[in-house]
Image (cartoon, coloured by chain):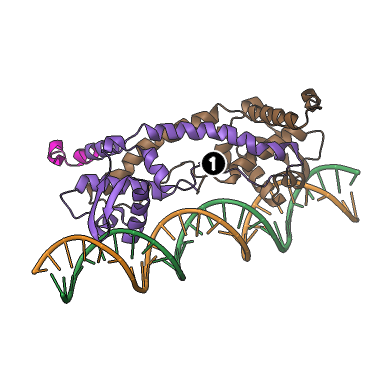
Chain colours: A brown, B purple, C orange, D green
DNA sequence: ATAAATGTAACTAAAATTGTTACAATTAGT
DNA sequence: ACTAATTGTAACAATTTTAGTTACATTTAT
């Protein structure tokens, strides 16, 4: 399997909060309608985002707030917040230690996998929530050619 | 989930073949003993490696052969051979098209995920099976300080 | 007060991964 | 030629992970 939709859905939540704050109630129900999942799934993810210090929420109040500006939240920050297993590749943990290959392949793969993972994470680290928001607005304006991009500004 | 142990186990199989060819029977049973899995799992993976042109086998004969030199087989070649889903990140496929965020986040994430995936795959592409074999031998010689590294040569 | 919302636990369902059983087809040794 | 060992593959089962659901105490908002 792959990096789960938890990651994509979490980016979605943060993008939703920033896009619709002051325009719509930011309830887990409204967010869930955009992701097309259940409000409980949204609240579960928001709990992790809160634990990681990315958002602030108040129990009972449908008004989450970003704790940082979108330009200061990287995709890697979000990845760290919601993915517990942070390795991308899985090393088989039970190879035969009495075999030259089985006894050394785990640490060998760890070394080379590390390089690939770091390269990917570095890319995530250089992409911000603001980049995501910008891209969303550009794509939206391509669908609504008559609408000024500026009309999405608050 | 993550890139499965299929990938790690496949690298293991190829490293085993190269390391023990001419020294041990290269049966799925012997290979499985090194990975600590079942022979059927090994044969299943070897089937994919064969389809991808990385190894050659003869039905009934326990003597698989690499089709290329270890320096010419990259980890990315192996990845392509055994992982059907070749994306690392999962994009939620059912977001609400009537929402600005839900309607544009899929293509947006595809764009940024692509960059991270390409970075990781590029690293895999620059690592060869020979690099893996070299690392395995060095690590093994660190465990057997009295043994000459050269004694692992054929 | 009452309604609406969050936070969280426990459970269920679905999907993916890994391992097992079974067996036909082929090779290898005697 | 016969037998044992092996591959190739399908079908199935077990395990693990992910995603969704139900339930409910707690808090906010009107």
Residue B108 visible? The answer is: yes
Q: How far across and down, in percent of the image, does residue A113 sit?
A: 39, 38
Count of numbered marks: 1
Q: Is residue A106 above or below residue A67?
A: below
Q: Residue at x 77, y 25 (%)?
A: A149
Pick whichever, B113 or A21, lies toward us: B113
Q: Residue at x 81, y 38 (%)?
A: A24
Residue A53 visible? The answer is: no
Q: Quadrant of residue B61?
A: bottom left
Q: How far across and down, in percent of the image, does residue A132 sit?
A: 65, 30
- How many residues crowd mark 1 within 10 Å: few (<14), some (14–19), many (20+)? many
Q: How far across and down, in percent of the image, does residue A123 sit?
A: 52, 29
At mark 1, the secondary structure is: loop
Magenta-colored span? B139-154
Q: Is residue B62 above or below residue A51?
A: below
Q: Quadrant of residue A13?
A: top right
- Residue located beneath label 1 in the image: B89
Pick whichever, A92 or B109, lies toward us: B109
Q: Residue at x 64, y 27 (%)?
A: A131
Q: Quadrant of residue C29?
A: bottom left
Q: Is residue A95 left or right of residue B124?
A: left
Is A124 a magenta residue? no
Question: Which chain does the residue under circle 1 lie in?
Answer: B
């Amino acid at each position: 399997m792959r990096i789960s939709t938890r990651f994509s859905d979490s980016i979605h939540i943060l993008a939703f909060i920033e896009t619709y704050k002051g325009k719509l109630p930011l309830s887990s129900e409204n967010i869930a309608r955009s992701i097309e999942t259940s409000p409980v799934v949204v609240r579960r993810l928001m709990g992790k985002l809160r634990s990681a210090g990315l958002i602030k929420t108040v129990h009972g109040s449908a008004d989450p707030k970003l704790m940082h500006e979108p330009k200061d939240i990287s995709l890697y920050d979000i990845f760290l917040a919601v993915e517990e297993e942070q390795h991308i590749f899985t090393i088989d943990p039970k190879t035969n230690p009495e075999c030259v290959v089985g006894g050394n392949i785990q640490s060998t793969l760890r070394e080379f996998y590390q390089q690939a993972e770091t390269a990917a994470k570095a890319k995530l680290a250089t992409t911000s929530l603001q980049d995501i928001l910008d891209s969303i607005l550009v794509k939206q304006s391509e669908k609504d050619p008559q609408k000024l991009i500026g009309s999405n500004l608050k």
